[in-house]
Image (spheres, coloured by chain):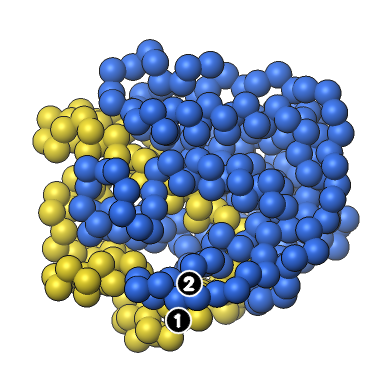
Amino acid sequence: MLLRRSGEISEESYNLSGVMSNADVGVEDEDLLVGIAEAVFAGDPNDLADVRAEAIGSIGAEKFVDAIGIASGFNGITKVANATGIPLDTRTEEVTASLRQQIGIDDYSESHKTNLYG
Amino acid sequence: MNMYVNQDLPVRQRIRDAHEAAINAFAEPGTWLDSHARVAILAEARHAHSCGLCQERKAALSPYAVDGNHEARTDLADDLVEIVHRITTDSGRLTRSWYQGVIDAGISPETYVEIVGLVATSIVVDSFGASLGCDPAQPPAAKNGQPGKESNPAVIDAGAWVPMLDLVQEETDIEIPTAPNIFRAMGLVPGAISHFFGVMGSQYSLTEYDITLKRSQIELLASRVSSLNQCFY
């Protein structure tokens, strides 16, 4: 949800529903970055090799390494959030209520998971 | 150890240092777990995706409909293996009921939090290494020594499954408090916070730091990975 705030600060407009779907968000090198995110999450060595080669040839090695730093970091920190059941920070909860509902993030909420799995 | 020296990509020194320190820390006695258990947790986190039960559960509409035994690679107790494997392979479908079941079975919240930190740290380091094309860092040999088992009293019930660090909150200009809940989540075990965020802080910051990507690109990556992990936070 920081992407929303990032857009506000830089006065750029992003299609945030694309984060949860295949729609374009409007970020530079978006397709490649999404590919990196998906490959890091899945962890398949062949897919990682493919995306690594593509990224190095496209955005360069330094940006690729910085990108996998972000992706791998969030691949871990989400485990902390999911496994501890932390609530949203108060202000974030207030300002993102409609956005969460609009793009489907509420489907990952505690109440929704409890409805699904008990 | 000199991590990532046998590959050509430009890994920042702060990341090399943080990852090496984090892997070595698995071999130190923790706050609630001894070194042997911590090293075993690293091994189980690395093995979890190959576990047949975890694969069955991952494929099921509900992981709670599939019973069985985990295919453990270590002598870690079964209830601890369940925690490690579930967090590693399917954290997005964990529920408060599952957590409560873990606690009711006799695992202390402090031990649970230490495990969460170890698993998450291992995932950051190993995801990064795999993305470079590197084999996982060699696990350290367990060291002697016992966990201190010192509770942190500076925690409160703030709506999470676990007590969170009790800190004064001030809002920043990005609408995130100075101590966001993700930082407070492992407050029961301050050592878990420093272990995890020692790595995470080398790779990401909410404020300006030395990185080649634009903030929008950083947050797109973060958002996409969070979505794939079914993370509400």
Please state which amino acid type lies under the numbered disc 2: Pro
Q: Are marks 1 and 2 in contact (CB under 8 Å)?
A: yes
Q: Which mark is residue B35?
A: none
Q: Residue at x 29, y 72 (%)?
A: A5
Residue B212, given in percent of the width and then of the height, sits at 22, 43
Among the 4 quarters of the image, the one containing residue A51 = top left
Left/right placement of residue B87 relative to residue B231 reads right
Element carrying mark 2: loop
Residue A9, given in percent of the width and then of the height, sits at 22, 71
Residue B84, given in percent of the width and then of the height, sits at 67, 44
Where A42 sits versus B151, above or below? above
Q: Is residue B200 visible?
A: yes
Q: Colour of chain A?
A: yellow
Q: Chain of mark 2?
A: B
Element carrying mark 1: helix
Please state which amino acid type lies under the numbered disc 1: Arg
Near-viewer residue (B51 or B123) = B123
Near-viewer residue (A37 or B28) = B28
Between circles 1 and 2, the one closer to the viewer is: 2
Q: Colour of chain B?
A: blue
Left/right placement of residue B142 relative to residue A46 reads right
Q: Residue at x 18, y 64 (%)?
A: A25
Residue at the far top: name it. B6
Distance in Å between CA atoms under marks 1 and 2: 8 Å
Left/right placement of residue B67 relative to residue B185 reads right
Q: Residue at x 17, y 68 (%)?
A: A10
Q: Chain of mark 1?
A: A
Which residue corresponds to mark 1? Answer: A91
Which residue corresponds to mark 2? Answer: B177
Where A73 sits versus B179, above or below? above
